[in-house]
Amino acid sequence: MAYEAIEFDATLAAAAGDDAALASELRAVFAESVARQVDLLRRARCDGNWQVAALRLKGVAASFHARPLIELADEAFEGVPGEPGIIRRIQGFLDEFTTH
């Protein structure tokens, strides 16, 4: 699932307006938050920790209207701790996001 900029960029524009520095800071905070949850998903060994990280990831995604990431977080929540496929797809989303 790929990063889609339209909804995210609209949300960012609504929050930052014409302030390019604020927009840049918000993008960085989003990326850091996603990276933190990916790390927690990688380290989760029990259902509780896995689900908490997935729910936090969904919250971050929802805050910025990042629909593909919301769907990935839902998929993670339903999955099993440490499932490499979903972690790889979430990391792919983050990698693509940070290169835009």
Image: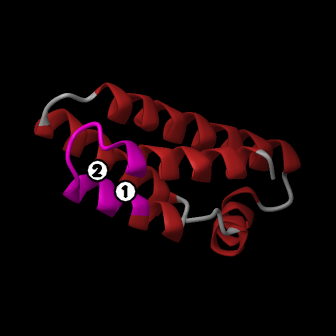
The picture quadrant where one finds residue 77 is: bottom left
x, y percent for residue 23: 76, 50
Residue 55 colored magenta? no
Is 10 positioned to the left or the right of 90 in the image? right
Q: Which residues are magenta?
A: 72-86
What secondary structure is marked by label 1? helix
x, y percent for residue 98: 73, 44
Q: Residue at x 19, y 33 (%)?
A: 49
What crowding class fits label 1: few (fewer than 14 Cα within 10 Å), some (14-19), or many (20 or more)?
many
What secondary structure is marked by label 2? helix
The numbered mark at residue 55 is 2
Pick whichever of labels 1 and 2 is earlier in the sequence: 2
Is 27 positioned to the left or the right of 92 in the image? right
Q: Residue at x 79, y 46 (%)?
A: 99
The picture quadrant where one finds residue 24 is: top right
The amino acid sitting under disc 2 is Leu
The numbered mark at residue 73 is 1
Is 40 positioned to the left or the right of 25 in the image? left
The N terminus, quarter of image: bottom right
Q: Residue at x 44, y 37 (%)?
A: 38
